[in-house]
Image (cartoon, helix red, strand yellow):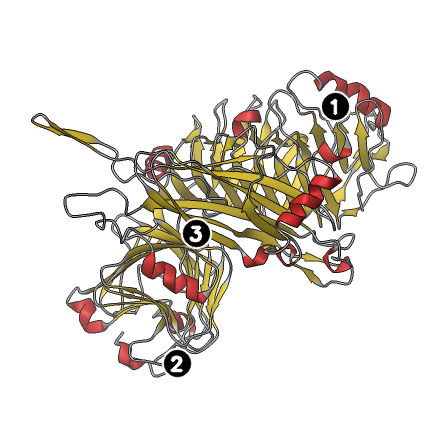
Amino acid sequence: MTQSKHTKRALLASILSVVLCAAMLVGSTFAWFTDSVTSGNNKIVAGNLDVKLEYSTDLQNWEDVDTNTNVFKDGTLWEPGYTEVVYLRVSNAGSLALKYKFAIHVADKVIGQTADGKEIDLSNFIKFGVVAAPETAYSQDAAGRAAAREAVATDAQLISAGYSKEGAMVKNADPEVLAMVVYMPEDVGNEANHGTGKQAPSIDMGISLVATQDTVEKDSFGNDYDEDAAYPIEYAATEAQLKDAIANVENGGAVILTDNIQLSEAAPITVEDGKSVTVDMNGKTLTNAKDIWNQQKNNWSVFSVRGGELTITGNGTVQAKENDSYVADLQYGGKLTIESGTFIGNISAVYVHTGELIINGGTFNIQQLEDGTGADQYRFMLNCYDQNYENDTAKITVNGGRFHVFNPADNAAEGKGTNFVAAGLSVVENDGWYTVGKAAANAEELGEAVEQGGTVILTENVSLSSPLALSDEKVQINLNGKELKSTATLNLINATGSADVTVSGGKLSVDNKNKASVVFAQDSAKVCIENCDIIYPQGMGYAVSTNGSQSKDAAVVMRNTNITANQNYACYFPAGTITMENCNVTGAVIISGGDVTIDGGTYTADGYSGQPKIWHKDDTISYMKNFAQKDGCGHMGDAILIMDRRSSGYGAPNVTIRNATFNTELTLKDGSKAAAYAIKYVDYNNIPDAERGRLNITGNTYNHKLAGGQEPLMFIGIDGTDIAYPAQ
């Protein structure tokens, strides 16, 4: 389509997303040179740039900070007056002088609700301050708390404001030690107190440290050769910060969003000629409040790549103002690569005047439609300037992604039958959405496609005789309504190492009764299951599971998925970060560690084969003692069992269960009916309340009461102590 066909029609712009995993990026090391060479007898040795970040709670014992480090106490429930102090140490561990940028920001947050439905953003209630650390740690008593609060009283600010500090260190310089004091002021009232049955608020604080070389070492001409050295990563929480970060970040570096951003200026975010940058949306949203379209010459989009190179990743959303602009455009030979995210434009999502667009993933839609009817209204979802498309200076290649009412392999953008899809890939349509990927009709084709990564689409039911093993692949498997089944004695989806796999839209099952799982994750693997049916027969395994201390860094997300393990273990989670959203589960869910969030859905207890009774307090204690000193999990016919044992490498189980519906009526062996428990928590070590795992159980519906009319909930110690967790 020729761009001039558009008068000021207002197109919607969805923003870009980038890859960097910004959740808690800390303590990263960036090398300048990392090698050495010799020339005759004159040895040339490369310098090494290495910055280190450590943390301590007592100024005596230090631990390295990395992406997965949580510097705060697990399970803490913040309340007015509560204070924590963390000591941070920045060191130059390399052989070169460096300058660094240290920052604290809100990496993620969950908005809660008060009893009367008002929103709670904890970042607007909790304060913090950063000062030089004292010679000895603040004492662990009221006097120490007061001293810590007094030290930051002048400069303390809300977490939402963030913090940044820049510094410099020569080789062998003394480390810089800081005290970060975080507290909730005593004058905070019920405006921060979430209501019973309402969403509990939470925030994740991100700590970042980046470094680059400083102007200290000299060459034959002085010390100014690295005066323009830029940081490899920049962060942005505002429009001004985003524009500055793109302009100033190291070429080839990344800009990470730390908050949603709404553009207030009538101008796009530009990437100019000579600049190469990745924008990591970090799950955030970018929108524009004012019209951008033609407010100045060539202003058509939220993002405009004008001769530079831009990569968008990070599963965020870019949505332009309705009836205003595109999401992105390419001019002057720019290059845009989209890896992931949601992009919503007007008339077009992305427009190429001159340059190259590569789409490897993401979801694309438009709000303002073109003239016409039906699919013809979406024909310019992806679009080039006609003349430049014909002379090959405007290019679009689609390697993956999902498109609403737009077939990227057969559209009218550049004339009937336009095909933007790369050779060898297929497109499938489901309910008006077109998905691009590699087609797989059998086990061999599936294995080859998964090894290559990207999007894979099943075109037939596939049965595997060995596990679908993923160790470092990043792949999205669209089951396309088909069944992926294993007849092997091992797991079906076996994700280890740094694998990153998403499976959606079909059925997963195993056809054996051995100790296997349909879905398994360990190491730092990430697994996402969406809109699937997971079936596990009676046997010795689990429908979905992680693997003890070997899965502490693993993450499993399940959305809108049905899990059926009749009279069996549906899920076993001894570690990892687990999220279950709107899932319907039949069978037992066992949790013995990790951070688990269950939000919505239905959980049905169906007992075990030949179950003779309901396991109340005394029977539960007797049975659970079997696992006090050994690995394993118990099945007593209940819906969810939380085993807090803190042994054999297991951490505290921090569990949130909200807005779920429980069906717990069982038919016992003698034919009688009785209600089992919806949730059981058993503490093996009788740990004091402040040190136990965190339980947040709110807003659930229990359709069956115990025989005495009580809610089907149990919170006990292994010695019979009743634990007062607020259940409803």
Name the image quarter holding residue 213. Answer: top left
User: Farthest front residue?
Assistant: 135
Horizontal side, residue 627 vs residue 473: left or right: right
- Label 3 sits on residue: 314
* Quarter of the figure that contains the N terminus: bottom left
Whether residue 603 is visible: no
How crowded is the residue under tag 3: few (<14 C-alpha within 10 Å), some, or many (20+)?
many
Question: What distance separates the C-alpha of mark 1 from that of mark 2?
Answer: 66 Å
Q: Where is residue 250 in the image (x, y as percent from the top left)?
A: 30, 52
How crowded is the residue under tag 1: few (<14 C-alpha within 10 Å), some, or many (20+)?
some
Q: Where is residue 383 in the image (x, y as percent from the top left)?
A: 30, 68
| Three-letter amino acid code at the position of disc 2 | Arg
Secondary structure under tag 3 reads loop
Q: Give the residue at x 70% y 28%.
A: 644
Q: Residue 685 carries which label?
A: 1
* Whether residue 363 is situated above or below residue 673 in the rendered picture: below
Whether residue 534 is visible: yes
Horizontal side, residue 722 vs residue 434: left or right: right
Count the labels in the image: 3
Q: Residue 469 carries which label?
A: none
User: Farthest right residue?
Assistant: 708
